[in-house]
Structure formats: C-alpha cells, structure tokens
Amino acid sequence: MHAIEVSIPSFRSEGSNIEKGYTVFKIEVLMCGRQHTVEKRYSEFHALHKMLKKIIKPLEIPSKHVRNWVPKVLEQRRQGLELYLQTIIMENEVLPKIFLDFLNIRHFPSLPKTESCGKLTHQPALLFLRDPYLLPTTNDMFSNMVIEGVIRGIFYPDFQPR
C-alpha cells in the first residue's frame, strides 16, 4: 500500500457561459491517514504535465481540446486525470517536488514516498530570542534567575543548588 493516495471524486463547472466557463476538479489526497482536498482547473494539470515532462516520463493527460460542458466528456476527463495522478505515484519511487506542491503536500525531499510517513524530522526544541549567555544588565533578578535556571538545566542537569 502506498503512503499517498489520490482520487478525483467530482468536478463542477464555473462561469456563466460556455466561452468564459471552466471546470474545477476536486482532488482528494490521503497521506499518512490525513485527508485534504485540492481544487484544480485543467489548465493547472496541463502546466504540471509540461513541468513533469522535463523531469520524468509521465502518462499523457486527456486532450486539452474538448467541449467543456458535455457531462460525458467531463466525466471521461475526470477519470483520465485521476489515472494520470495515480500513475505518477505508482511509477515513481521519489515523487517530484512540483507534483507534491501541486497536491499541497508537505514534501520530504530525501525520502522515498513509502518512507515519508511516520518519520520525525528535526525540529528546534528551544529557541532563544537573544543570546542566553549574555545576561541582562538590568537589576531584574527574576529574569536572571530564569535564564540561569534554563542554562543550568540544559548544560548541567546534575547540578545541585546549595
């Protein structure tokens, strides 16, 4: 089973007439048990395809020139775009960054798709807004005590106060 699953369950037409209207495809993305939805127009799929052709050999996408408002044709296009996305996932060990960006997936550039779930990446545990070794010059003993306590806790965990 793959870590990323995509489907295009539906589409909708936008715009008031055939000449200025367009179709929006609803893409459902399931990754590591979390699902989110992305909506894309065909022109965005076409742009993705052009970029992917420079990196990998993707399946051809459905034809750009169709009658957008014929439901049967739109359903065929939906199925073709869904197969296109699924094939990219199935045929590539490491998914291209532009593909992950298209699906609004946070990418793990060095990890293959099947290992990207469940791995923790390094995250800072403590952040100082200024250098903790430079104690404030004010007479505020409380802030000095807090900074000293943090420094001792991190660098001298066995320190026993008198």
Image: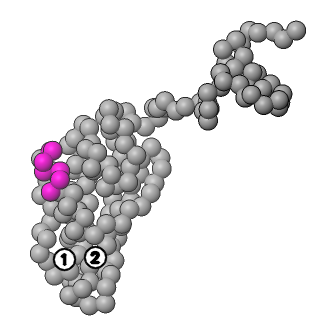
Foreground pick, 93 / 83: 93
Where is residue 27 drawn, in percent x and y?
A: 35, 62
Q: Is 120 situated left or right of 139 in this image?
A: left
Where is residue 111 drawn, in percent x and y?
A: 33, 33
Q: Disc 2 residue type? A: Thr
As for residue 55 lying within the magenta part, the answer is yes
Q: Is 131 situated left or right of 107 in this image?
A: right
Task: Please tell me whether residue 128 is drawn above or below residue 48 in the rendered image.
Answer: above
The residue that appears at 26% across and 60% down in the rendered structure is 82
The residue that appears at 15% across and 44% down in the rendered structure is 55
State the mark number for residue 73.
1
Can residue 77 be seen here? The reply is yes
Secondary element at image label 1: helix
Foreground pick, 162 / 132: 132
Task: Please tell me whether residue 78 is drawn above or below residue 147 in the rendered image.
Answer: below
Q: Quadrant of the C terminus?
A: top right
Q: Which residue is mark 2?
A: 23
Q: Disc 1 residue type? A: Val
The residue that appears at 20% across and 43% down in the rendered structure is 91
Where is residue 93 drawn, in percent x and y?
A: 24, 37
Residue range of the region highlighted in magenta in the rendering: 50-56
Question: Tag 2 or tag 1, which sits nearer the N-term?
Answer: 2
**Which image quadrant for residue 108?**
top left
The residue that appears at 27% across and 42% down in the rendered structure is 95
